[in-house]
Amino acid sequence: MKPPAFEYFDPRTPEEAIGLLGEHGDAAKILAGGQSLVPMLNLRLLRPGCLIDINAAAGLSFIEMKGEELAIGARTRQRAIERSALVREKCPLLHEAMPFIAHFQIRNRGTIGGSLSHADPAAELPAVVTALGGTLILRSVRGERAVKADDFHVAYLTTALEPDELLTEIRLPVQAPQTGSAFLEVSRRHGDFALAAVAAWVRLDKNGRCEAAKLVLAGVHGVPFQSAAAQASLIGTTLSPGDAAQASRLIATELDPQSDLHASSDYRRQAARVLAARALEQAASRARMQAQE
Amino acid sequence: MSQRVIRLQVNGQPREGEAPARKLLVDFLREDLGLTGTHVGCEHGVCGACTIVMDGEAVRSCLLFAVQAEGASIATVESLADGERLHALQQSFHECHALQCGFCTPGILMSMLAFLSETPAPTEEQIRVALSGNLCRCTGYQNIVRAVQMAAARMAGK
């Protein structure tokens, strides 16, 4: 089908975009990469009064260090992140996850901010940014605020964004020394949404024992899924295959994924458990390699 | 509905048209510029039939509005052949029988054009991953993979 009619704005600055959002609020949708929004328009699942196209707005596309953190502009194309040497060096978990997002043609347009704002539960980026402990910068005519990724994802397709707010930047802590990470996914075909995906990292102390761990699942819950018990179970261990299996059992017992036409609840829970164990083992082996250097 | 004037480069030529904001780029190319080589399939970014190259990158023209192509440089399947002489990609698809009904072919050719310019000597695995964003429902992928391998060798040789 063809999209319904809408009023179209293409502001040249973020300030202008924020002004338009303030004016139109709920009636407006931000058009970034359009790789989720335009299908929804074409299928007429959405009928916004106006679109605010931020593709011509300057200053929303960048990848750079700001102090100790990696800062990524919200409209930065996923493909630019995939190709970035800085991302590969500072946030290897993000680098590893990028090729799992749809197909290269989609990543050529799709943006990091668009994916986070759309908040599809099977999408990779919300889980990765949550695992990394990222901070999202939201701007409106009322001012600017910083929201932790943990607090940003509220429910299925729902974020902490107010109707007048624009996500402008993502800040990611860089990977610490003695740390290893891994991203794994199961989908029907390459590029499909994840039936289950996992983003994990672990950090070793000087004795080779785990001092910090993060394990986040996608595709199995309304928002990126974490288990405090699973993470706590890893602290102080040597991250043996048995330790990884134990943590993955703990997170799987807390899971209650929905069944749909792509996979049953049991299948998703099983896939998540197996992937979580593999990701933890891979992250641990990478952390040990880091520690040896 | 208000119309907007859109000026852009298509296949090396300056072109101009007028369209309402909601007009998809693929429909603008086909209906307003008369370039019907680009096909409209699923209209939600899944099938890849409408893939074109915009400013050097393969993109879905069903997920862009024509107004967003203002000032862009676009290549469609019509840009490939030089008169009667087929592009190496087209010639390889022809020789390997990599198309049957041909509906998906324009999108596959433009995807592979962008892919091979970035990855001139791909492995079979890389080709299969790169093809995953284009659906073919009749030829089967074996011959398509073979054609892309042949085209890569020919394009590297020239």
Image: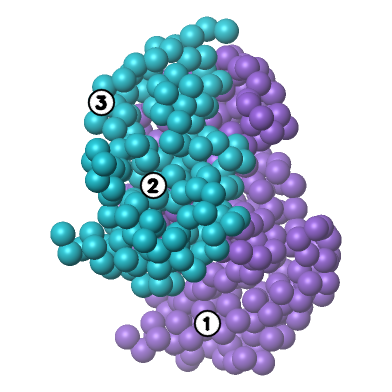
Q: Name the residue under label 3.
A: B13
Q: Mark 2 points at which residue?
A: B110
| Viewer-nearest residue: A147 or B1 | B1
Q: Mark 1 points at which residue?
A: A282
User: Crowding near pointer 3: few (<14 within 10 Å), some, many (20+)?
Assistant: few
Rendered residue at 33%/34% (across/down) = B74
Left or right: residue B12 compared with residue A47: left
* Image position, residue B31 (x, y; %): 48, 22
Rendered residue at 60%/81% (across/down) = A278
* Image position, residue B88 (x, y; %): 28, 55
| Viewer-nearest residue: B106 or A59 | B106
- Quadrant in the picture for residue A158: top right
> What residue occupies the far left of the structure in this picture?
B158
Left or right: residue B53 compared with residue B98: left
Q: What residue type is labelled 3?
A: Gln
User: Crowding near pointer 2: few (<14 within 10 Å), some, many (20+)?
Assistant: many
Quadrant containing the N terminus of chain A in the rendered view: top right
Q: Can residue A159 be seen in this view?
A: yes
| Chain on which label 1 sits | A
Chain B representation colour: cyan
Chain A representation colour: purple
Quadrant containing the C terminus of chain A in the rendered view: bottom left
Tell me if residue B35 comes above or below residue A196 in the rendering.
above
* Image position, residue A109 (x, y; %): 45, 42
| Chain on which label 2 sits | B
Q: Are marks 1 and 2 in contact (CB under 8 Å)?
A: no
Q: What residue type is labelled 1?
A: Gln
Distance from disc 3 to disc 2, alpha carbons, whole Å, reads: 18 Å
